[in-house]
Image (cartoon, rainbow, N blue to C red):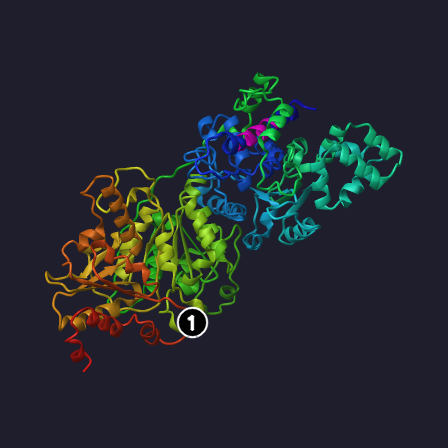
Amino acid sequence: MTADTLNLKTIEKRLLWLSHWMIHNANNLRPKADGIKVGGHQASSASMVSIMTALYFSALRPEDRVAVKPHASPVFHAMQYLMGNQTREKMENFRGFGGVQSYPSRTKDVDDVDFSTGSVGLGVAITSFASLIQDYLSAKPWGSDTRLGRMVALVGDAELDEGNIYEALQEGWKNDLRNCWWIIDYNRQSLDGIVREGLFERVEKIFDAFGWDVVRVKYGALQRAAFDESGGAALRDWIDACPNAEYSALTFMGGEVWRKRLMDDLGDQGEVTALLDRRSDEELAQLMENLGGNCVETMAETFNAIDHDRPLCFLAYTIKGWGTPIAGHKDNHGGLMNKTQMAAWQQHMGVPEGQEWDPMATVQDVPALRDFLSQVPFFQEFPRRYQDSQIDVPQIGFSSERDISTQVAFGKILDELSKGESLLAERIVTTSPDVTGTTSLGPWVNRRKLFARQELPDAFIENRIPSTAKWEFAPTGQHIELGIAEMNLFLLLGAAGLSHSLWGKRLIPIGTVYDPFVHRGLDALNYACYQDARFMIVGTPSGVTLAPEGGAHQSIGTPLTGMSQDGLATFEPAFADELAVIMEWAFDYMQRDGEGDPDERTWLRDETGGSVYLRLTTKPLEQPGKRADDTFRQGAIDGAYWLRPPGPNCSVVIAYQGAVADEAIAAAGIIGEHRRDIGVLAVTSSDRLNAGWTAAQRERARGNMAAQSHIETLFQDLPATCKLVTVLDGHPATLAWLGAVKGHQTVSHGVEHFGQTGTIGDLHHHFGIDRDALIQTVSRLTDGAWFAGVHA
């Protein structure tokens, strides 16, 4: 056995102990505040120890990136603790406030997390899109020095039930994926039971169909040596034929039961009997549990034998709970060793009392191990977080003298950027799930091309067939076309939105999607925001205003999603000039790093930055003419401005958001002929208005009574008797909270039920978001004497 293998085995043993002790401490030793199990997945961690030891301490280089299986989080933290990158205080507070996280988190853990994980399947799939973004960067002149690394996912076999994994496989095949490893912890046990027999055969066929190489790692070094002995072939055949559930049960019962079962099944065959008799019960158990994924020597040899960049799936057979008293038990997924089991296991592991947290406890040659650790290639750089300078945002001015929709205005703004040579335009990368043309990205793509590592000609151009889509694939292209899978869209945006941190090359990712299908990718959207990825998502067209398409294509709840999603500033502008102002601000906001003085003007803490969601529409609106005053510009960014300022005796304010602007304005005009001082509030972001308001309330609760949000400033002069009428093409709760700001009586119009086909007028009238409905509401809220005259 080589010195490197001995060191790997020592590290493997240390990680097994430290990860399990951390969990045990959290559940059985640390005072319990809530009286409930803290948890920590000891068995799922144990099955990954050998794989992670071989990967991190033998195979990886600093440019490689890893998404760690969520339930292997304790092993990851133990590894960083061993390397001095994590503190004992945080380890002792595992799953506690301020401690190491339940699942690896880029934003909440201090150790070197590459990709957050937790929602199973997403951490797996994002590695394939990270590889694609890595290729995108290296193909550009400004990114040609990008260090190409392997994007690695450590995968629980139960994660293979997640459909987004297979969507990602298909996208990877289409984009000639490379430098991507998925390492499957094939322990054949999940939360509810044993994985079905023969799953690996299906897995291999699927990966093979999408162009991946599959490496099956089934037998460890001890088993391979035993197979070479007389009688070894029969033992191997028995292992191959043994059902998953049986293997797990025998593992839990131990060496004596292993021996009896093998003798019962194989009989006294002389050579087989001799093979078994040469081993004690403990040694026989070690042999039978020495599957490939639980053998650090085998895993290191397997990883280091790879000499190509084709995508690879490693199917590593493991024992769930390997090396512990709960190994193999069908309930061990969420199970924990009790105090008695832990005490016995501590003695078995040779860890003296009082040295449980000592990283070097049980290590026989500490200087030799420290020397080995100091030379491990992967840990030569820490932390592997990079930065890129902020990109200047050119002035984006766009107004129109004719009717135009926000969707069309968005396309024209991007088209204008595409014509220029700004650094911003150079760093923009767009993507869309097969709706590029219908979401107004077509002109941008025509000028900036689609990305591919190799040039691909457009047959229509070569054959001189007229087409509005002059789409050529080239390494210089700046659009990544996706199939119809919104999960892939948000995973790609997440990977691209981390490019400044992962590779030190800033991208400005913009994705477009039909607004109702934002919800099809919500898990991946939340995942991208949780990692603090920076991108712009454009949901268009939106609402029942997409009238002829029917209820399946008409979004209702997306404004509320935008309000509730952390890390995402959501806007719904009605006019092109609002959109231009917001996009100029957004390109800067996406690059902010959290430094600088807090902006106490709105209490939004905009210095932290984040991603941006634009909810746009296809409905053309008459534009308000050129507006350039600071009040309008700042109001559009902060979330609202007075389109029609209320008078001193204002009795009614109509507040609208988005596509129904013309209905609100028309209603106010009609009412204004009979009631003076009516106000019209143009809401561009209910999200930012609400966030500022709640933040200001928290600040006042802390004693700063001067804190006042933007919406409170706008409402400060409204009479207490003023009524609010709100309206938008979305759920009415989006704006209903406005009445709570100053205690004004409020009636909210919106859409609460699935839409249907029809004209815009039909649907706006049906759902009560047209001018007539607003006028009727105002009549009910006031004396209504004028109302009969309006409709006479």
Q: Secondary structure at mark 1?
A: helix
- At horizontal 16% and vertical 53% (from top left) the residue drawn is 716
- Mark 1, other Cα within 10 Å: few <14 / some 14–19 / many ≥20: some
| Residue that sits furthest to the left in the current view | 648
Q: Which residue is mark 1?
A: 549
In this view, the residue in front, 626 or 237, is 237
Instruction: Give the main secondary structure of the magenta stretch.
Output: helix
Q: Report whether 728 appears left or right of 780.
A: right
In this view, the residue in front, 333 or 525, is 333
Above or below, comparing residue 127 to residue 59 in the picture: below
16 part of magenta stretch: yes
Please provide the residue range marked out in magenta. 13-23
Residue 21: x, y in percent? 55, 29
From this viewpoint, is residue 621 visible?
yes
575 part of magenta stretch: no
Residue 612: x, y in percent? 35, 52
